[in-house]
Image (spheres, rainbow, N blue to C red):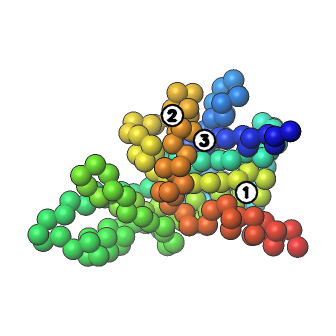
Amino acid sequence: MLANPQKQAVLFLTNDRMELYMPDMAHILTYYFSDKIVRNLEVVDQAALDLDIQSFVTRNQLSSVEVYILLSETVYFAKDLVEDSSFHLDVEIGKFIENVPFENTTSKLYKVINMTKFVAANKDFLDAIRLALVNQGLLVWAVVPAFIVGEGISSLTRQAGEHVLAKTEIMKQNTLLSEMPSMQSASKQQNAK
């Protein structure tokens, strides 16, 4: 007998909410962040965020799910880099990073049709969301800006969710966070000790 395939979900993360799509669900699930928990892409109360996500996962019976996090434009800062004879990548990135308003950032260069796009986001915020999900038994495979799978996603729909789930390999290759599933299981085992 074959093992059941892992369920997959898309979590669309914005500055004020999370939307979750799974193929077998009747509708998109939405969780709005309280200003007392998340404000300006900063986690104000980690314990409350963990409890809210635990409640969200339990209430919606989300267990053993592979999650692909798609970031809205409201969650990251991006700069299009056009290379010419006076272009210096390190200088341009340095100038841009100085203006990103977070103490701890994660960033990545993406090649997008004839240009390079540099993306930076609040690493602490993304890690807090990812860890809260992982601590509930969900497996986060990738965290990527929405433009990686197509332009124009401002809210999650069934059609967008299906489109994203058809591009999971692209998402895994372009993830913004470096600690993904193999490291998650090791850190989860350490937390259990």
Amino acid type at image mark 3: Val
The residue that mark 3 highlights is 10
List the single residue furthest toward the top: 26
Relative to 65, is 88 above or below?
below
Find the distance from the CA under tag 2 to the CA under tag 3.
10 Å
Could you say whether the residue bearing mark 2 is in a helix, strand or loop? helix
State the image coordinates of residue 56 (x, y, percent, origin top left).
Answer: 75, 42
Q: Which element carries disc 1, helix, strand or loop? A: helix
Q: Earlier in the sequence, mark 3 or mark 1?
A: 3
Q: Nearer the viewer, residue 141 or 2?
A: 2
Judged left or right of residue 37, residue 163 is left
Badge 3 density bin: few <14, some 14–19, many ≥20, Cα 10 Å: many
Visible residue check, residue 27: yes
What type is the residue that disc 1 sits on? Val
Residue at 14%, 65% (x, y): give it.
84
The three-letter amino acid code for the residue at tag 2 is His
Specify whether 130 is left or right of 1.
left
Q: Residue at x 29, y 76 (%)?
A: 90
Where residue 116 sits in the image (x, y, percent)?
Answer: 29, 58
Q: Quadrant of the N terminus?
A: top right
Tell which circle, 1 or 2, labels the residue nearer the N-terminal end.
Answer: 1
Q: Residues within 10 Å of mark 2 (few under 14, many from 20)?
A: few
Mark 2 and mark 1 in contact (Cβ < 8 Å)? no
Residue under label 1, please give it.
Answer: 134
Mark pair 3, 1: CA separation: 14 Å
Query: Residue 163 has which mark?
Result: 2
